[in-house]
Image (tube, rainbow, N blue to C red):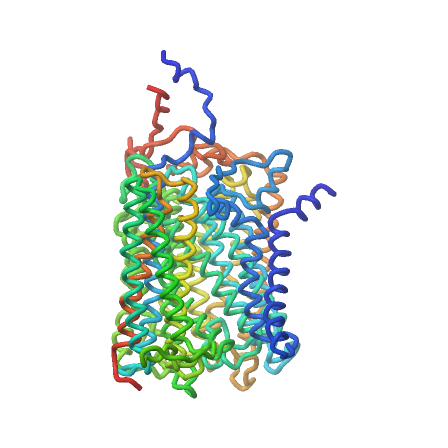
Amino acid sequence: MSAATVQTTHDEAHGHEVPYATQIRSNRLGLWLFLFSELFLFGALFTSRFVLWGNTRPDLSQEVGLLATGVLLLSSYFMYRSETGAAYGDQKRFLRSALIAALMGLLFFIMVVVMEWNVFGLSGSLFGIELFGHLKPSDGVYGGVFYAMTGMHALHVLSGIVLILIIWWNGRRGVFTPERHWGVEATAIYWHYVDVVWIFFYPALYLMGQPA
Amino acid sequence: MLRTLKILLTSALTKGLVGQFVAWALGYGFIAGLRALRGMPTPWLYEPAVAFGAIVSFIGFLLAAGVLTDWLKWVVGKRTPLRHGTPEGKPEWSRYVNVDYNHKVIGIQYGISAILVLLVGGIFAIIFRIELAQPGMQWLTNDQFNTLFSAHGIVMIASILLGVGAMVNYLVPLMIGASDMAFPRLNAFSYWVSLPAVVLILAGMAVGGWDTGWVGYSTLSLRAPLGVVLFLLGFWINGFSSIASSINMLVTATTMRAKGMTLFRMPIVVWGAAAASIIQLTATQTVGVALTMTVAERVLGLNFFDPNGGGNPILYQHLFWFYSHPVVYVFVLPGLSIISELLPVYARKPLFGYRWVALSSFGIALVGFLVWAHHMFTSGMADVLRMPFMFSTMLVAVPTGVKFFSWVATIWEGKLPKNPPTPLLFVLGAISVFLIGGVTGPILGTIPTDLHLHDSYWIVGHFHATMFGGYIFPFFAALYYWYPKVSGHMYKERLGKIHFWLMLPAFWVMSIGQMSVGLLGMRRRVADYDPALGITTTQVLITLAALVIGWSVLIMVYNFISSARSQPVAETNPWRSRSPEWQIPSPVPEFNYDVPFEVVGEPYDYGLAGSVYTRNLAPAPSGD
């Protein structure tokens, strides 16, 4: 009889603990179900745009929009680097790339919410390009849909930035290992997802239809 | 007595309510402060401040109740083990007023809240039903009437969602042999977040009420009194509960099933709950968008629905019904599964067409997504949408018919007891009532007849029959059936039978009465009617029937409270069920199954010689 079998009086709670592998499987499925649910949130906004705007679109700053889109898409690359770093135990790459992704996310957020939104009463131009948008929230359905879509997306970007900062802060303290870094994985998937949503939102807002 | 008071006052429930109030005041003060900085006075009950406070208030509730504590600790990198069992030195009941992560505790919390909220919604109905007994206005103003019927709708929906949560949370892990749900903390969140939502809806009645009904159609909702904002936000916050609990349910059923439980050996209740969860997971988001847009249009001045700014009020209806039609299947699918679960137990023969019944839940859910615009035949939506939605609506009858024929075939030549126990009575009652609701539906789904019956009392009768047949009667059947499992005591059979024999005939009178006054010209959502319609006698009957239903539910509440104190301890398996939860002691131990089981046969093969459903797995030798 080995020593282990003597320990029959196992801790009851411990005995019923879900194995880590099962928990991770549940976590992954749960996250994807959540993202599937979010698809209907963004889908409803996307559909509303076509119902309310039809074949028209508001006059928006193409330069700011294109730049913001580029920054957000590029940030996904750094998020991917960061996750790979965490998976291979490359602490430096993990932390540095996460921070770059968060900063690029912040840049996107500023470009949309501070520059494109016309709520802070700012104005100015650089190289002849107008830096700040004209569309006000009260500008009929154009304002309504634009602010609803960018606002809902910006909220997700903002929460993504917070998540990245959380994994960055915890990563510095050595919470994640190559074997156990679900937090990093989940944040990366979420960040890519928010990115993909914008790939649909950007043309719907900036490119499709005749300028009204 | 003093100790009880102390536990209650320091419970998560009390802390949450205080937290909600404080957060509301802080949110209100924040907006008022911002305005003060810019030199603007803030009038009392200023709408943007009330709305912002309401949004902050539900976070305040959750923080103060301690629902978010573990997650906040995870953010700073701490690991938190799950708490198990009753906290030391506290009585067992204190678990139910505090944040607890056990799925059975949460299930019972859901159940008790569902019954309490059901009583509140029922009282609203009875108040305005008494007003409707006679033409002319007796004891309500028009505004009070509008607020009451609106609140009756949304409060009942909150109650039904709580009741569905009760059945899913308590039964699903037990039936699939899991020790808990996949995400216990998320499970607690789903329950607790629905409480501040109900508080907001009730608070909406106190600050002027609203007159939009539970549908909150634009543009009426843009001009309704302040209460509508709290109603919309309460509705919206309840969505968090739906989405979180549906994720939890789907993941639990996917990853935590017992050994040998393949998809087609899952109990029908799990199938029904999974189908309902898929609807909750997805459709809830679109009504969330509709509600957010309405609040944004009122409070922030964005334009979506008001045609004055180019908006489209029909858009609201599409977004709203894309959720609100499928959601009725969230209500009835768990209920219909309860019928399929209980019938074979009492008939002592296999469930007829198990696979078809299992898949019919998904069929209903799928078709349910394709029929929403049948609520809008008279709304002025695009004509081209009418015919497709009429046909898809008729299609619902196919998977629903599968369920009906399965029930009939299961009863056929079965050994139903001569003196049916209360759960069986409620199951049979449910079938009869759901049949009334079912056959009155196609008349509304057909465009020519709907043009006449739209917004009449016919719809009220049809809808109540589907809800009572699909949810209320099966829910009560489930309460009686699993009461010995939950409490360890048998309920009082006599009182249960009295409850049933009061409620069923009263419901028939009420529902058929509502349909008949509808045919004779009674509009819904109006406080008064013309005595020349000749429907006053029927209106009196409907009101009396409503009162009888109300009293009968109180009998059930009394039965459950008194049986837990006075009745003898119930035997382990009073219904001779094959389901695994009946093979273990009642009430169920903290971790459900001390010895895990393996599924080796079909779940509903009652009465077949030598058929086995589950077999205990020998505990694995530890260590080697």
Residue B226 place in picture, x, y as percent: 57, 75
Residue B284 place in picture, x, y as percent: 40, 63
Residue, x 39% and y 53% (percent of image)? A164
The residue most toward the front is A127
Taking depth in this image into account, of B206 and B472 the one nearest to the observer is B206
Taking depth in this image into account, of B322 and B31 the one nearest to the observer is B31
The residue most toward the top is A1
Residue B601 place in picture, x, y as percent: 28, 36
Taking depth in this image into account, of B287 and B32 the one nearest to the observer is B32
Q: Quadrant of the N terminus of chain B?
A: top right
Task: Please say whether residue B155 is visible from this viewpoint.
Answer: yes
Residue, x 35% and y 67% (percent of image)? B439
Please count the marks in the image.
0
**With B150 as the anchor, is B624 left or right in this view?**
left
**With B397 as the anchor, is B79 left or right in this view?**
right
Image height of A123 relative to B172, above or below: below
Task: Please say whether residue B448 is visible from this viewpoint.
Answer: no
